Image (cartoon, rainbow, N blue to C red):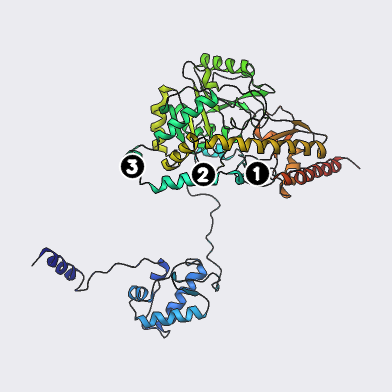
Amino acid sequence: MSAVETLKTAMKTATGNVPLRRRAHFPLALESIALSPTSSVPLYEQICRGVRAAVASGDLVSGAAMPTIVELARALGVARNTVGEAYMRLSAEGYLVSYKRRGTRIAAQAPRMAEPRAHAKPEKAAVEIGYFARKVLDMPVTRGGTCKSLALHSPDPTLFPRLHLSRLVTEELRRPPTEMQLASGGACPRFQSAIAEYLRLAAGIHCEPEQVIAVSTPEAALNLTARVLLDPGHTVLVEDPAKDDVRAIFAASGARIEALPVDARGADPRRSSGPPPRLIWVSPVLNFPLGVQMAEARRHALIEMARAAGAAIFESSCFSELIYSGHRLRALQGYDSDGRVIYHGGFHCTLGPAIRAGYLVVPQGLVEPFNEMRRRLAFAPETYLQSALATFVKENRYALHLKKIRAVYAERLRHMIAACKAHIPGATILEPAGGFHMTLHLEGDVQRVCQIAAQEGLHVQPLSRFYQDHHHASGIVIGFGAMADSAIEPSVARLGAILREHSREKVPA
């Protein structure tokens, strides 16, 4: 007897002389239908009841694929005619729909015999979250990626370079991954080389390709930096005001957050207080939300301050490609002579949040710990996306895209300033040097104004939200990135009307 015949004989013996069959894969709710041959209810009706109950409970949702008659009959141990009769009745009742190519499925408008099971939500979690998580979750964070009127952090999705970038991504996906890509832990040498060359020309940064660490999002960049550099109790000096998620992420590491005040000339190292920092977070190209740039002298003073404290500097430069006025200054990293500056840039402001790719440029002495920590935490974007972006940058497509969107956003900013002057004359407008947000200084209960505006679809934010130090001017922050030019005037007009109505309400009778 051959080896194959011996194996077949063994299989038949093990399964009671019944050849093994591949088990059909279908919803557990169907396989769990309990049938009673001794019941007065026919078997086909018992199957119908099981399907109806599963639809009512939500275990079978609209569009769910049903097994074939043969598969379900085999699983339940009944005749095919029994299952066939059940399917015919369920189809007549509107539960099932048969398609030529997609098979039998739960109908989109399947009747509900009862409400879906309500899963009770305990008032308190069985497992408590940690101290640092509670501390972070108590801090409000402004989310981006929305196209609502006057919302912040929202680039225009219609400006996405679909034609060229989608072609490059498709080409990369068609190529099977190489052994180097599989073993790289998220590193893409083409991406590192393209970014290093681009930054040398665009920002005056001098680095080797291996110093470029690919990260998926700005939050990932902050988290990775915190994991590598910070211990609980370390002091982090953060520009004040700043994006609220910066403080939240550094607080998650157990760091103590101190304010680095910002005025019309950017962050001022002379006004900082508190213990010597371990890390200093700044955005010298463009502060959010004030829209100001850090003066040249203060940049040098900041580096001297970091040197004296033995601190690192995190240079956030997400808006560097969206500067419409002011000076085009060299990145802080270009002034760094002893390896203290960590430079962060990315594509989320210029290509949109759907392109989850950015980069850190770290000092040579930190390359290995940053790379290893990134591998373990899976903070890197997919290598096919990195490779596509590398080609996009090298072919000069990215530079052409930046030229286009700078013109669009600059024009949109001019419309926004004109609309604010016309409809909110009592506000002091801080005209930003770039980005797609703007700050208005005004008096009154801006918190209440923002709440009323949000109810009408205008998602402005109070300026106080972005300050750690509460001694600051009152105001609101508005965005214009995702708004069509034609929508700016009516949106600002309605905001002005809300401000006037609220002012009248405050006046005593």
Please say whether residue 436 is visible from this viewpoint. Answer: no
Callout 2, which amino acid?
His
Callout 3, which amino acid?
Thr
Q: Nearer the viewer, mark 3 or mark 1?
A: 3
At 51% from the left and 27% from the top, the residue drawn is 199
In the displayed orientation, state which residue is furthest to the right.
509
Q: Secondary structure at mark 3?
A: loop
Give residue 182's quadrant in the image.
top left
State the mark number for residue 178. 3
In this view of the protein, which residue sits in the foreground, 309 or 366?
A: 366
Give residue 20's quadrant in the image.
bottom left
- Upstream in the sequence, badge 2 or badge 3? 2
Q: Provide residue 223's location: percent of width, then percent of height.
A: 49, 34
State the mark number for residue 482. 1
> In this figure, which residue is indicated by the disc labeled 2?
164
Callout 1, which amino acid?
Ala
Q: Secondary structure at mark 2?
A: helix
Q: Nearer the viewer, mark 2 or mark 3?
A: 2
Q: Is residue 82 above or below residue 493?
A: below
**Disc 3 vs disc 1: Cβ atoms closer than 8 Å?**
no
Q: CA distance from mark 3 to mark 1?
A: 38 Å
Total labels drawn? 3
Q: Nearer the viewer, mark 2 or mark 1?
A: 2
Q: Provide residue 214's location: percent of width, then percent of height.
A: 45, 34
Q: CA distance from mark 2 to mark 3?
A: 24 Å
- Upstream in the sequence, badge 3 or badge 1? 3
- Seen in the image, is 411 located left or right of residue 496? left
In this view of the protein, which residue sits in the foreground, 236 or 288?
A: 288
